[in-house]
Each structure stands twice: as C-alpha cells, then as structure tokens.
Image (cartoon, rainbow, N blue to C red):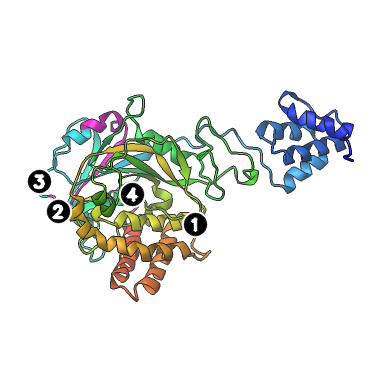
Amino acid sequence: MTTPPSLLSLTIHSAILNLSSISDLSFLPDHIVLHLFLETLKAGKLNERVLKLFVASGKDEVLSLIGEFKIQQIVTPVLPTIHIKDNEVDIVIGAFHSDLTSFMNEWRPVFTRFHLIIVKDPELKEDLEIPDGFDLDVYTLQDINRIVGTSNSIKFSGYSCRYFGYLVSRKKYVISVDDDCVPAKDDKGLLIDIVEQHLLNLSTPATPFFFNTLYDPFRKGADFVRGYPFSLRSGVACSLSCGLWLNLADYDAPTQALKPSLRNTRIVDAVLTIPVGAMLPVSGINIAFDREVVGPALCPALRLAGEGKFRWETMEDIWCGLCVKVTCDHLKLGVKSGLPYVWRNERGNAIESLKKEWEGVKLMEEVVPFFQTLRLPEAAVTADACFLEIAKVVREQLGRSNPMFARVAEAMVEWVEIWKKVGSGPLPDDN
C-alpha cells in the first residue's frame, strides 16, 4: 500500500509551484526553508529571482549550501558587460582590386564612424581608387618593406596582406572583411551592421566550458537553460568573433565544384560559443578580435605551394584559426561563431581552384588531429608565448615528416619577433 504524502510535502510542492508569487521566506522556520530549497533544486526551479529570494531569507544553512554548490548571483545577461568606443576599433581591409569605389560606397553607412586600415596587395600593380569621406590609412609594398623589412618567412601578398593591417593597428579591437563582400540585409530588408554585432559578441562573455542549448545566453531574449551550472554562468572574455556569409558561402573547392549552384540564402539568427577543445575552420572573410589579447596569434604562417587569389585557394586563415583556438582554450578565453552575416559576391572557378587547394584538403586530415591533442604548458600565459609553444611542437612533430611545416614553424617564430618589434608604439617614419 502506497504511503500518502505528508502535509509538509504537499505544502512544499505547492510552494514550489507558486514561487513566483512568494516575496519573503524569512518568517518560516529554518528547516522548512532548507527543505524548500533542496526540493526547488531537485525540481530544477532555481532561477535568478528564486535564488535572490532564498538568499534574502538569511537562513545560515541555505546560505552555506549555496556557497558549497558554488551558486552565484548574476546580473541579468541581456546587455554588454563592456562598452566599446568607436575610437577603440580599426577596420582592416585587404585590397585585392584596384577600384574600391563600389565596395566602399556600399559600406559607407557602417564604416564612416571608424578608422580604416587598407592594405594594398603587394602584387597589385594599379593604383587604388578610393572615394572620399572616410578616415583611413593606406599601406603599400613600400610601407611593408619600410616597417617590417624583407622577410624570408612572412609574405604579405594575396590574402596575407591583411595581417600587416593587424600588425600596424594600434586599436584594441580589429574587424576584418574581404573586399568581395558587401553588407547583407536581414529578413526585414534592413542593412546588417557587422561592426555592431561583432562588438556585441566581443563585449559579452563567452561560455566555452558548458554548452548552452539556447546558444548565447547574453543575447536579448535568451538566458541559461535549466541545469546550467551557476558557477559557470559568469563566462569568460570573448576574444574572437567569427561572422558568416550569404550568397557564396565559404565552401571549399571540392564542395563548390560538386554543387556549383549551391548558395546560402538563409540567416540563422544565432550566436554560439565554440566549446573548449573543439576546433573550427576560422574564415578570415568576416571576423573580429581583441588585438591586445590574441593579436600575436593571428599570423599568415601557412602558405600552399600553389596558393592562388581566391579564398578557396588559400589555407592561411584556417591554420591561423586553429592556432588562435588552441591559444584561447589554454588562456580560458572564448570564441564565438554566427552573426553577423555579409553578402559575398561571385568570384573564381571552383574547378580550376580545386587543382590548387587539393594540397590543403589533404593537409587538414593531418593538421586537425594534431591540434585536437595539442596541450600547452602552464607557463605560457600570453598569446605570443602560446604561439611560440605551438611553433615548437609543429617543428618537432609535423616538421620532421613534411618540410612545409618546418617553414611554418619558422614563420610563426619570426612573426612573434616582428610583433614585439613593431606591433606597438610609434611606427617607423619614412626615411
């Protein structure tokens, strides 16, 4: 015969169902409040308001349990925890086309508030055409040679020219976008401000240590789901924001060749933190990062033998992203992916590019397992120290069987030296 519930258990059950209408528990006996607290935990009903209710009761045993369980009161996570000013941001653009008039005018509503760094591809012969009305600095091959000198390991040609922009920036935050992209529009037909969304991603915490199934809990209208540990809800600083693309998505050449008409037409209204230990292919097409924290780890170290002038013919950003992700994981920093979107225009021939990228496709089968198992020493507490440790292991483990990786390691070491020399302070003047 089943034992009927006691009056106390029925009362506790009723109280749990009506916690939203209870404003004070302090008048109840200590053991009743303790019982109610434990049953509330079991029922998964402990949220921010209910936690405040129990804390306000002042019951010592309840407060002791809250401390033991490392349950923390948090500020409602709907607004950025950092306010980023316009003068803390540089927008870096690698110029691969001489006429930037249409590109710049498309971005005018977004870019005019910020300082721009335009780095001309050293292999581009024609003079740049840039419309008036922007606060910008333009860097050419002459500037690269003046500031960095001639390097045997680091090449700033092609898509790698943007990294020179990262080097000479003196702002805390950098946003980088390819010159074959224009602003996308949302489902209401409104222009998407990629700067605003990237800065929102960077200014709110990331949650890499436990996955939130409602994605970014710090976005308006979202929060942490039931079962998410309170001790992890404060999150960590986000140092890298990876945006996405409409129209021509960043597929590899084999995928685009097999599906030539495949286009991305859907905006997924979501931002998520990449979990610690998970690798991702970072695309340099549309990213933002905290330069002061992870800048030294963004380096154009890996260049394919047949590297071309289209995104799917390069791997420098993929390698760079793997290095940054390992660095962020080690330093307990966050990486986010999702919003904002840009619109990518049509470029290149996937069939022809496949001949050049195939080397990179094969390399990834070796590179990804390497990074997945890579662990850095506790003594590495900065991005440049992490980067040097990665270079050391690349040389020892990958460089022995493939000379290309020995060159990559050499480039990584030289990059840190360059960064320490000219990555801060005044830039060298013209002679």
Q: Please tell me whether mark 1 or mark 2 is closer to you in this view.
A: 1
Note whether residue 302 is visible.
Answer: no
Amino acid on which disc 2 is placed = Glu
Amino acid on which disc 3 is placed = Glu
Q: Assess whether residue 232 is covered by the magenta stretch.
A: no
Q: Are marks 1 and 4 in contact (CB under 8 Å)?
A: no
Inter-mark Cα distance, 1 to 4: 18 Å
Residue picked out by circle 3: 126
Question: Which residue in the rendered view is the most extreme toward the left?
Answer: 126
Q: Are marks 2 and 4 in contact (CB under 8 Å)?
A: no
Residue numbers of the magenta segment: 105-124
Element carrying mark 1: loop
Q: Quadrant of the C terminus?
A: bottom left
x, y percent for residue 327: 45, 57
Mark 1 or mark 4: which comes first in sequence? 1
Inter-mark Cα distance, 2 to 3: 9 Å
Residue picked out by circle 4: 283
Residue picked out by circle 2: 123
Mark 3 or mark 1: which comes first in sequence? 3
Inter-mark Cα distance, 3 to 1: 44 Å
194 horizontally vs 57: left or right = left
Q: Please tell me whether mark 3 or mark 1 is closer to you in this view.
A: 1
